[in-house]
Image (cartoon, helix red, strand yellow):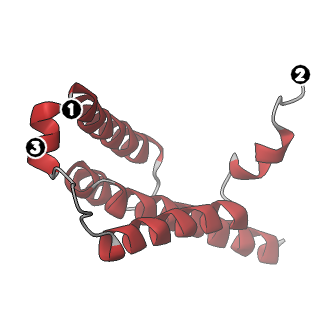
């Protein structure tokens, strides 16, 4: 068996407390940016940026593609009833729906693991 090239990332491969903290941190940063992020002087705005910049258009398409991949991952790998509604919601609100759903999936898996350990 070949050793992993990034052993420090092993703790994120399966549901874990560290992975839940990562989801929580990402969601917190997203919410804080949405709440406290303001337009700056000279900011073009969304529509002007989309009209003027091909890079901005590509990034918007990329966000849509990543949301779709995240939704697909959640539907295919999720085990709770939340997976389908959260996947659909993530197509509209992106990570605001996807991150909590992934965290919930991991939390349920960790709770089941704790229950199995207690039952042994």
For this view, does 5 lie left or right of residue 67? right
Instruction: Verify CB contact (< 8 Å) between mark 1 and mark 2.
Output: no
Give residue 89's quadrant in the image: bottom left
Q: Can residue 82 be seen in this view?
A: no
Give the residue number, with chain letter if any, for mark 2. 2
Q: Which residue is drawn at 32% across and 43% down?
A: 67
Q: How many neighbours does mark 1 have within 10 angstroms: few (below 14), some (14-19), or many (20 or more)?
A: some
Q: Residue at x 21, y 32 (%)?
A: 57
Mark identifier at residue 57: 1
Q: Is residue 58 above or below residue 30?
A: above
Give the residue number, with chain letter if any, for mark 3. 48
Reading the chain from its start, which is encountered first: label 3 or label 1? Answer: 3
Mark 2: secondary structure:
loop
Measure how far apart labels 1 and 2 are at the Cα level: 41 Å
Instruction: Verify CB contact (< 8 Å) between mark 2 and mark 3.
Output: no
Q: Residue at x 25, y 38 (%)?
A: 60
Reading the chain from its start, which is encountered first: label 1 or label 2? Answer: 2
Mark 1: secondary structure:
helix
């Amino acid at each position: 068996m070949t050793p992993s090239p990034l052993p420090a990332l092993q703790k994120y491969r399966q549901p874990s407390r560290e992975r839940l903290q990562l989801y929580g941190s990402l969601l917190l940063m997203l919410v804080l940016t949405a709440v406290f992020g303001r337009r700056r002087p000279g900011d073009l705005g969304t529509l002007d940026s989309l009209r003027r910049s091909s890079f901005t258009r590509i990034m918007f398409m990329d966000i849509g593609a990543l949301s779709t991949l995240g939704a697909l991952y959640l539907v295919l790998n999720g085990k709770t009833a939340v997976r389908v509604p959260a996947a659909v919601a993530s197509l509209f609100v992106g990570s605001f729906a996807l991150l909590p759903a992934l965290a919930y999936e991991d939390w349920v898996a960790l709770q089941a693991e704790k229950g199995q350990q207690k039952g042994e």
